[in-house]
Amino acid sequence: MASQFKVLLSLKRKEGGGGVFYKHDGERFTQPHTLKLNQNTDYVVTVQSNRKLRDLMIHGERCELTEVKRDKSNSSDDSLKFSANFNTTGYAAEKRKGRKDIAIALMFDSGATLTVLLQCKFYGQGEIEHCRWGSSLTWIEYDCSLTEGQTGVRVNKHKFV
């Protein structure tokens, strides 16, 4: 028997809280969507789910998690929210038609792990114009399932919102 759950993932610039943009690339690359990020920039990654998150790894590096306090005015919401910082120092700016897959691993208290790839294009630190072409990302919503006795979470579908 598989249990179903959702995971929401968002990225925002740490300085000023500005959003991240993405564009739909169709089938030109390994993923249909590309996130546009700047080099040498701090981002805040937020994960929301009804499952407690134990660890978060981005591109093989463990990120320090902070549990975000719940909004008490919305008592019907039983989801948990965690955030972590992600710094893009060391990521090379992509050349035209270049993309980089960034692995995100979410390890839950239950021992289950969700791993997703985010296709990214990195621009220079000060590049603003190209980084804002496309749609503003609110979150990526993953519809997931976990089969009893297994630790790998399956993504049944995802959508960029």
Image (cartoon, grey):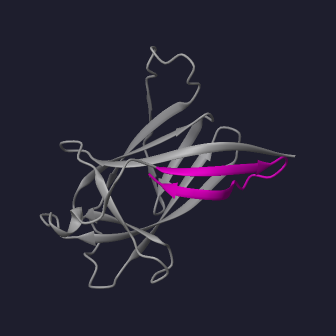
Identify the image quadrant of residue 132: bottom left
Observer-nearest of 54 and 15: 15
Residue 57, image x, y percentages:
49, 54
- Residue extent of the magenta highlight: 140-161
Answer left or right for 126 relative to 3. Answer: left
Nearest the eye: 80 or 109: 80
Residue 157 drawn above or below residue 18: below
Q: Is residue 16 left or right of residue 141?
A: left
Q: Is residue 39 visible?
A: no
The residue sitting at 40% across, 43% down in the picture is 84
Q: Is residue 144 magenta?
A: yes
Name the residue located 65 percent from the left edge and 57 percent from the top edge: 155
Q: Which residue corresponds to the image point at 69% horizontal and 47% vertical from the top-left?
A: 112
Please tell me whether residue 143 belongs to the stretch shown in magenta.
yes
Q: With respect to residue 30, does 148 lie above or below?
A: above
Reply above or below: 44 against 35.
Answer: above
Rendering quarter of residue 127: bottom left
Residue 87's x, y, as percent? 30, 55
Residue 2 in view of the camera = yes
Taken as a whole, is the magenta stretch helix, strand or loop?
A: strand
